[in-house]
């Protein structure tokens, strides 16, 4: 008789809230202490945060394997992906910025209510991008969801690097301070077009400098896809010059967006194989 396969260990990592700060009207910075975090060196390093359901007692340490085997699906923690704004190795402090729009969503309300001592479980980090020291210049483009990754990238730019940063937020109150780079802010409240239109237009109109660029475009999937076409089809850039990611899609939560991406990837594989 064949023995059953051993259950996969899905023990999560632990972090404890140290402090919170509302850095703009709709952005909350949470500083957490964690002895379990191991930085991977990427400026777009991200973690999968687990938000436990109220009134449900979970095993500690949190083991997703146990939870998924023994709890009904409606009691499983909700997973959300967030970029790490910064990591302080000496203090073991993990800083994560949360966009907050009232009671909307899961992570924003959690951050608004978080208190020192609260426990937050996570997996990761992942990541793939760091500004290349070999590039002649850098372009970073994003919305609120990409601000932490772009802020981290600006701080990791090589000394003397040339960089242009294009950012779309709701209005001037949502602007943040960055390093000594060319930062251009676009406000949705003052624009007549759709979300991301100003970023797409700015990239299309940008006079690319001579030399090899390294480009980072992350945020809402709609504008990321439109900029992708400009960079690859019209400007002829190679894949290794560009980091692209649709963090989210307008009208969908993360679960719906991840399911859509998985379905698209499946259909592309089937098309390639046929």
Image (tube, helix red, strand yellow):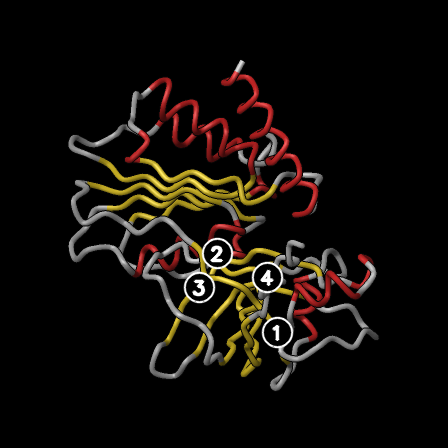
Q: Earlier in the sequence, mark 4 or mark 2?
A: 4
**Which type of secondary structure does the marked residue at label 4 adopt?**
loop
Comparing labels 4 and 1, the label whose residue is closer to the camera: 4
**Total count of labels:** 4
Disc 2 to disc 3: CB gap under 8 Å? no
Label 4, label 3: how far apart the Cα atoms are: 30 Å
Q: Which of marks 4 and 1 is nearer the N terminus?
A: 4
Name the residue carrying label 3.
85
Comparing labels 4 and 3, the label whose residue is closer to the camera: 4
**Which type of secondary structure does the marked residue at label 3 adopt?**
strand
Q: Which of marks 2 and 3 is nearer the N terminus?
A: 3
Disc 1 to disc 2: CB gap under 8 Å? no
Q: Where is residue 105 in the image (x, y as percent from the top left)?
A: 72, 56
Q: Which of marks 4 and 3 is nearer the N terminus?
A: 4
Name the residue carrying label 1.
120
Crowding around mark 3 (Cα neighbors within 10 Å: few <14, some 14 to 19, many 20+) is many
Comparing labels 1 and 2, the label whose residue is closer to the camera: 1
Label 3, label 1: how far apart the Cα atoms are: 16 Å
Name the residue carrying label 4.
8
């Amino acid at each position: 008789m064949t023995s059953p396969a051993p259950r996969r260990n899905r023990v999560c990592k632990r972090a404890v809230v140290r402090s919170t700060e509302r850095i703009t009207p709709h952005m909350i910075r949470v500083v957490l202490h964690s002895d379990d975090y191991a930085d991977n060196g990427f400026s777009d390093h991200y973690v999968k945060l687990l938000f436990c359901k109220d009134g449900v007692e979970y095993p500690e340490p949190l083991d997703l394997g146990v939870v998924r085997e023994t709890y009904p699906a409606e009691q499983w923690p909700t997973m959300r992906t967030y970029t790490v704004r910064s990591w302080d190795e000496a203090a073991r402090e993990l800083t994560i910025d949360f966009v907050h729009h009232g009671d909307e969503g899961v992570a924003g309300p959690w951050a608004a209510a978080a208190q020192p001592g609260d426990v937050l479980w996570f997996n990761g980090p992942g990541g793939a991008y760091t500004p290349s020291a070999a590039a002649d210049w850098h372009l970073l483009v994003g919305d609120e969801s990409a601000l932490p990754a772009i802020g981290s990238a600006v701080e990791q730019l090589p000394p003397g690097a040339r960089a242009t940063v294009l950012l779309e937020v709701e209005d001037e109150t949502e602007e943040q301070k960055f390093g000594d780079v060319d930062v251009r802010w676009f406000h949705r409240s003052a624009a007549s077009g759709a979300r991301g239109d100003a970023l797409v237009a700015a990239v299309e109109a940008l006079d690319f400098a001579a030399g090899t660029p390294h480009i980072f475009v992350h945020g809402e999937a709609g504008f990321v896809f439109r900029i992708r076409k400009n960079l690859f089809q019209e400007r002829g850039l190679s894949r290794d010059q560009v980091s692209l990611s649709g963090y989210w899609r307008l009208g969908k939560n993360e679960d719906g967006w991840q399911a859509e991406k998985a379905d698209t990837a499946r259909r592309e594989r089937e098309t390639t194989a046929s």
